Every structure is written in C-alpha cells, then in structure tokens.
Image (tube, coloured by chain):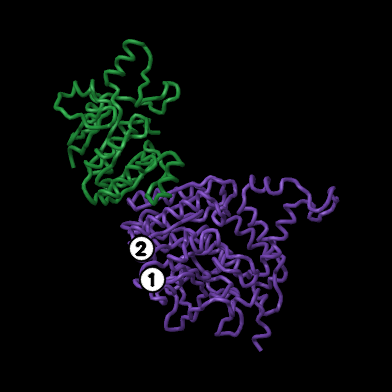
Chain colours: A green, B purple
C-alpha cells in the first residue's frame, strides 16, 4: 500500500537513523527491501508487518521475519517497549487512523521513524490552486478515486500531530524528489514548500 | 504362546524397519496422565549427516496418521515417504545440508510404544491399558531421543497439523533447544469442530463388533470396517469442496448410468472406500483413538494460565507459521492466534497464508509458494545459526 516504492536513498537515510544491533519493527515493509538493508548493514534484529499477502510471502521467502498484518489493527498485539525502533516508511498516509498508528508506534518502540510524502509541497499546492484538481505527481501517481492514500498531510500537519501525541522530534529532514536529503538549512515553512518527502525520528516525551 | 496371540495391524509395531531407541526402567517417561511409562521404545528414521558441532539437526514431527518414513519408501505400503515434496537432496529440508530426524509418535503403531505394542509386563498388547497420550508426552519422548542422539539444540523443529502442535509444544517446553520452529496448518488448541470430527472417527472404530473393547489384538481380530469408516470421514476434512469438485465432480465410476443401488456409483465414493481400505493395512485402530485424543486434549494456553503468549515469553526461537486459505480444519484464524501470541512477546515470527484450493492436505503437497516460504525461512535461520550455505 505504499504510495510508491521508496527510493534507495530514502531507505539509506532511514537506515542511517538506526543504531547497530537494534530491535526494529518495520510497519508496512512491502517487499522487505529496508529490512534486508538493515539486516545486512546494521545487524539489527529485524521484523516486519505487511498488509499484502504477496509482500509477506516475498519477504519470508527471502528469509525475513515478516507477518501479515494491518497497522490499524494488529499493532495492538505488540508489547510496550518491545522494540528499539518502529519504522513507518511511506505508509502513514495509507492508514485509516494515523494518530492511533503513531501512538502505537511510540508505545511499542523506544523511538519511531516516520517518512511520508509532503502534501504541502509547492507542486501539489499549485495543482489544487491553479487546476482545481486533486494532485497527481510523479511520487503520487494515483487518481483520487483509486488511491490507497487516504490521509495525506503536510510537514506542518505532521509536526502538529507529533505535538498532539506528545512525541519529541529527535531528528528530521526534508527530502527531494529522489529521496535525497535537502542539504541546506531552512525554517520549516520553506521545507514544507520544497520538500517532496519528509522523515522524522520521534520519541515519547515522557517515559 | 503370546506370539501367536499377538497380531498387530502390521509387523512394524513390534519389529519396525527403523532404528529403535529403547528406554528402560531407569529412564521412565513422566506422562501428562500422571503416570510413569517404562520401558518404552521410539522408532525413528534419519536422513543426512550430523555435522561436527551438531548444529544442523532438524526434527520433523509427523501428523495424525503419518509416521517416521518421511522420505523413504514406506515399509508396509511401498509408497514414497509423506514429505518427499520437501525433504531430500536440494529440497528445502535439504538432506545434503541438514541431519533430519523423524520419530514415530508415542501412541503410534510403527515401532514406537503404542497400544499395538507388546506390553512386556503382561505379554499382551497394551490396548487401552496404555495411558492416554498427550502432545506434550510425544514431545518429551522425542526430547529423550534427541538427547540420546547427543544433540543439544535442534536447528529446527517442524511439522504440519498434529506435527505443528508438537513443534509448538517443543518451543514452549524446551525453548533453548529449538533454534527455529515451523508450525504448518496447525493450531494451539483443537477446536470444537475438530474434536467433533475425531469423536465421529472414534465412535466408528468402537462401533465395529471386532473392536472388542480394545482387546481385538489378543482376540485375533481387527475392527477394520470401523477404522475404514473413520478414515473416510476424516479424509473429507483434509480436502476442500473445490478440490473434491475439481477432482471428482459428480462423475460416475466405470459405469454409464446410476445403478439404483448402494454400490460406489460415484468416483468420490470409490475414492473414499479405497482410502479407507488401504488405511487399515497400515494403521492400528486403537492407535487411531490415542492420536486423535492427543490432538483433542491439546490446548497450549491452558498449560500457561490461559495465556498462549506466556508459553513463549523470552523465547529465543525463530518461528514461521504457515496456513492455507482453503484449509477449513486448521484455519488461518487458528494460525493467527499463534501469531498474535508470539507478537505479544515480541518473538521472532513470520506468518504466511498460502493460497491454494487443496485444503488441509496442502502441507503435504508440492505447493510452489509453500516450498519457497519453507526454503526462505530455513535459509534465513541457517544464516543466523552460522550454517554454511
């Protein structure tokens, strides 16, 4: 249910946030590319959850520990503090209840890593403003009537959500179209215009 | 004169074409029923070579009426082993890479102590004097065999159906001895429907006048009719409606018209009768009572205060749970119960539901997605175990 298979650069950036040997749960792990990267480069204890049966079968056939599950429902089964990192890569916008999913991630993991397409990007704003149509971009290719992405947000929206669920932003970055980190300092309202994607490292404010 | 009075279903019960591990009165088996069993024997087959550090051993657990002949011709029927699809050189359970053990379960009739075995204390078959056997008894007996073979940790314990129950039980009883476990088309407890089907089978056996309250061996007869009916009913539960329809439909057996009689007019009738009649040549009727009872009594959560997750707390085992979407006997929902419990303790678990219309028996078949899953899971576990590829 990913908006689009995330680019390699995007995954490398996620991997860069994870410490060696950590316990990691990748929610919406797709075909397991990130899990494999983490296993190979960070020697993590990597687990995955994926909603599509084909994705799960592909992952397990690769030797990855992945279960079929729905983030909106099945995260509730995992124990509090069971993982060092819970990762949601390009999946937040496809969940039915993003706030609940984020709360669950912060409960299960000591830290949460979330990446998502930024709906505040100027090209998306332009499409709505100028054409009056729901945006379709190279990163968000679905038409409104067939998209699995039901809960888009902008970078600013996400920061507000993080505040609401009492998460502290440990690290964050805006990414360009290819998923590479945007390499200059800018206030958030600039990133919210220019970043095609965003990535946040969060932790609970308390406990 | 006891020999002349002892006619088990086949000669394998007392003289199996398998290796046997004998355990004498110095090593009794503490059974769930609260009694000690001694002496007892375990008949087993092995395939492949145990490596120098004894880290490549896999225990395969057979299903209800399976046996230890996983990958060799069956000594009674001459048919290929029951898991030739997955076990052999180059297969997922690669006999060139792993040392594979499969033992006949306690209560079975292929050489491990069961109701058809001769009770040395009486000179007669145990019959119903054998204590009721549980899945835990089976696992504890297997553990004694594994210890006898000098193996401390099994690389994998795997099985389908009742074999999956044993694998699950192993992981719960001996977490440090189970590096990985595959639980295929199985459940953590037997459902009411499954108990019901088993009861139908047992009543069919007991209704046969030749059952003789379980003493048929010493009386020189066999409840073959009852056991065949039990098998026929059970066999339907191993298939699916789609598979039966595809294979047989309403096709008639070697005839153009219905005969207006109770002959096996339909191919499906003929097929079931054949399944029933061949089964009785290799299986003991009392054994059928024991192994079905073992499944019925299985409720792993109950042994852990009603919490299945508690059975796997701090488990170091890597689990792979597999279900088949057309299996209505051991459903995907039952597998999910296991997965939820394992997730609740953050155990390492993979879960795959395989799409096929072949029903419960899919786990015995060469289903490409299932084979790929098994191969991938074992390869990942082997890497983690440091076993060369």
Whether the residues at callouts 2 and 1 have beta carbons within 8 Å, the answer is: yes
Give A84 or B173, whichever is nearer the viewer. A84
Q: Are marks 2 and 1 on the same chain?
A: yes
Pointer 1: what residue?
B51
The answer for how far apart the CA atoms under marks 2 and 1 are is 10 Å
The N terminus of chain A sits in image quarter:
top left
| Number of other residues with Cα within 10 Å of mark 2, as a class: few under 14, some 14 to 19, many 20 or more | some
Pointer 2: what residue?
B387
Q: Position of residue B38 (x, y in %)?
A: 48, 80
Query: What is the chain letter for disc 2?
Result: B
Query: What is the chain letter for disc 1?
Result: B
Residue at x 63%, y 77% (from the top left corner): B11
Residue B262, can we see it? yes
Within the image, what quadrant is residue A105 found in? top left
Q: Earlier in the sequence, mark 2 or mark 1?
A: 1
With respect to residue B223, does A28 lie above or below?
above
Residue at x 33%, y 56% (from the top left corner): B313
With respect to residue B304, does A114 lie above or below?
above
Residue B307, can we see it? no
């Amino acid at each position: 249910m990913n908006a689009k298979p995330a680019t390699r650069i995007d995954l490398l950036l996620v991997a860069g946030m994870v410490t060696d040997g950590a316990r990691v749960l990748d929610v919406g792990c797709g075909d397991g590319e990130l899990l494999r990267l983490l296993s190979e480069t960070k020697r993590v204890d990597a687990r995955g959850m994926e909603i599509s049966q084909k994705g799960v079968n592909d992952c397990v056939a690769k030797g990855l520990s992945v279960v079929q599950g729905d983030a909106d429902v099945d995260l509730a089964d995992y124990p509090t503090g069971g993982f060092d990192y819970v990762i949601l890569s390009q999946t937040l916008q496809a969940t039915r209840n993003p706030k609940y999913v984020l709360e669950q991630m912060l409960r299960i993991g000591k830290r949460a890593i979330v990446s998502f397409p930024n709906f505040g990007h100027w090209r998306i704003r332009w499409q709505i403003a100028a054409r009056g149509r729901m945006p379709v971009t190279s990163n968000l290719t679905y038409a409104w009537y067939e998209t699995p992405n039901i809960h888009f947000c902008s970078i600013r929206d996400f920061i507000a959500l993080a505040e609401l669920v009492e998460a502290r932003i440990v690290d964050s970055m805006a990414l360009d179209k290819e998923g590479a980190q945007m390499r200059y300092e800018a206030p958030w309202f600039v990133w919210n215009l220019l970043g095609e994607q965003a990535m946040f490292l969060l932790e609970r404010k308390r406990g | 004169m006891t020999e002349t009075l002892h006619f088990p279903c086949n000669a394998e019960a007392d003289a199996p074409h398998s290796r046997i591990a004998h355990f004498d009165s110095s090593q009794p088996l503490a059974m769930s029923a609260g009694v000690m069993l001694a002496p007892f024997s375990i008949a087993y087959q092995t395939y492949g070579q145990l490596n120098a550090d004894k880290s490549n051993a896999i225990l395969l657990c057979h299903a209800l009426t399976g046996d230890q002949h996983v990958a060799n011709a069956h000594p009674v029927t001459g048919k290929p082993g029951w898991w030739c699809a997955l076990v052999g050189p180059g297969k997922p359970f690669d006999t060139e890479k792993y040392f594979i053990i499969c033992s006949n379960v306690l209560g079975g009739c292929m050489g491990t102590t069961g109701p058809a075995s001769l009770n040395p204390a009486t000179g007669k078959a145990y019959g119903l004097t054998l204590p009721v056997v549980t899945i835990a008894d089976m696992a504890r007996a297997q553990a004694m065999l594994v210890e006898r073979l000098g193996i401390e940790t099994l690389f994998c314990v795997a099985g389908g159906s009742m074999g999956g129950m044993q694998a699950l039980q192993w992981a719960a009883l001996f977490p440090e001895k189970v590096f990985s476990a595959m639980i295929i088309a199985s459940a953590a407890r037997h459902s009411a429907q499954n108990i019901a089907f088993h009861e139908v089978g047992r009543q069919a056996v007991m209704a046969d006048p030749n059952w003789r309250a379980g003493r048929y061996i010493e009386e020189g007869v066999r409840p073959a009719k009852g056991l065949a009916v039990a098998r026929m009913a059970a066999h339907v539960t191993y298939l699916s409606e789609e598979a039966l329809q595809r294979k047989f439909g309403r096709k008639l057996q070697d005839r153009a018209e219905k005969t207006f009689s109770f002959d096996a007019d339909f191919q499906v009738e003929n097929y079931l009768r054949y399944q029933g009649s061949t089964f009785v040549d290799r299986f003991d009727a009392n054994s059928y009572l024991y192994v079905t009872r073992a499944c019925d009594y299985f409720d792993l959560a109950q042994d852990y205060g009603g919490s299945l997750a508690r059975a796997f707390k701090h488990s170091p085992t890597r689990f792979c749970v597999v279900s088949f979407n057309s299996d209505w006997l051991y459903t995907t929902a039952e597998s999910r119960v296991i997965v939820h419990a394992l997730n609740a303790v953050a155990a390492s678990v993979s879960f795959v539901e395989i799409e096929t219309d072949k029903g419960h028996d899919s786990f015995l078949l060469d289903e490409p997605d299932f084979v790929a899953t098994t191969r991938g899971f074992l390869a990942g576990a082997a890497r983690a175990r440091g076993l060369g590829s």
